[in-house]
Image (cartoon, rainbow, N blue to C red):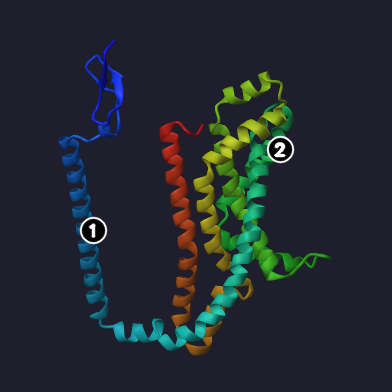
Amino acid sequence: MTLLKDDSGREGADGGRGTPGADDAYAPSERRLDRERHKRARARRATAIAALSTLVTAVVLYVVVVNAPGWPRTKETFFDAHYAREALPKVLEGLWLNVRLLLICGVLVLVLGMLIAIARTLPGPVFFPLRVLAAAYTDFFRGLPLIINLMIVIFGVPALRLQGVTVDPVLLGGTALTLTYSAYVAEVFRAGIESVHPSQRAAARSLGLTNRQALRYVVLPQAVRRQVPPLLNDLVSLQKDTGLVSIGGAIDAVRAADIIAQRSMNYTSYIVAGLVFVALTIPMTRFTDWVTARMDRQRAQGGAI
């Protein structure tokens, strides 16, 4: 066998080719380079069009709103900088109550929703009464408007004058939120549990796992992973609805804005409270979108069961 030397002086076997060296690095073809340049040009063009259309839309909306006959009065009533500066500290102070309600009620909702979902999916005739009760719970609280549930719990429970039962509107409002959202989350968990193919449970049983172990180690992990995006959406909704506890007199962000508005007869504080809630919701919404997109990519690549 004849040995050949390449340009770097290294020897390689013949057969028409030398040993691949540093000079044999991959070089994309001209067609591929043209295709990549075309994609970049299209991306720049799409970005420019989107920016231009957004600017035009914003200008049109600004012109329409500013030239409206009632704009001066609306600006004075809803967009007064003086009242905004006055309301912001009070609204932020009340927002801490909303955040605490979100954290506590969120954990309780996830736990109670999971238990209800498991109760609805228990097999066998012996668990029929439990399945009926769980189904009745979800049907009732999903059909009952949240505002009515809050009024019943916040105003109805104290009217009973039960010994040892709290009359704190914050605790009662959190209870009402937990009852309602647990019904929605239970259906999300149940959909995830039922989406797991029965062969998964059967395979777990064939390996010697009990029904409880198969549910805990095989079914639930897959069910929860599949339902993360809708669960996060429910938590986003819960974060906004914590402001409804103000109907019982709890001083949260909404109630703080309402107090300032009634005292000053100016509604700028409502705008401040709304913007604060939006600022709190946007990160959660973007996180939900990121999780959803990530799970979609994993599912498309076969990386998630």
The residue tagged 2 is 130
Label 2 crowding class (10 Å Cα cut-off): few <14, some 14-19, many 20+? some
Seen in the image, is 48 located left or right of residue 292?
left
Q: Position of residue 84 (x, y in %)?
A: 45, 83
Label 1 crowding class (10 Å Cα cut-off): few <14, some 14-19, many 20+? few
Q: Position of residue 52 (x, y in %)?
A: 20, 63
Q: Position of residue 112 (x, y in %)?
A: 67, 48
Using the image as rendered, state which of residue 118 and residue 299 is in the foreground.
Answer: 299
| Vertical order, 291 against 57 (above or below) | above
Indicate which label's residue lies in the foreground, 2 or 1.
1
Residue at (54% x, 74% y) in the render = 254
Q: Split into 4 quadrants, where in the image is the N terminus?
A: top left
Seen in the image, is 98 located left or right of residue 51?
right
Tell me the kind of residue under disc 2: Leu
Residue at (47% x, 85% y) in the render = 85
As measured in the structure, the alpha-carbon distance from the residue carrying label 2 to the one carrying label 1 is: 54 Å
* SS for callout 1: helix
Q: In the rendered image, is residue 297 in sight?
A: yes
Residue at (34% x, 86% y) in the render = 73
The residue sitting at the front extreme is 9
The picture quadrant where one finds residue 173 is bottom right
| Lower position in the chain sequence, tag 2 or tag 1 | 1
Using the image as rendered, state which of residue 272 and residue 296 is in the foreground.
Answer: 296
The residue tagged 1 is 50
Which disc number belongs to residue 19? none
The residue sitting at the top extreme is 1
Total tally of numbered discs in the picture = 2
* SS for callout 2: helix
Tell me the kind of residue under disc 1: Ala
Using the image as rendered, state which of residue 293 and residue 113 is in the foreground.
Answer: 293
Q: Position of residue 235 (x, y in %)?
A: 55, 55
Using the image as rendered, state which of residue 148 and residue 51 is in the foreground.
Answer: 51
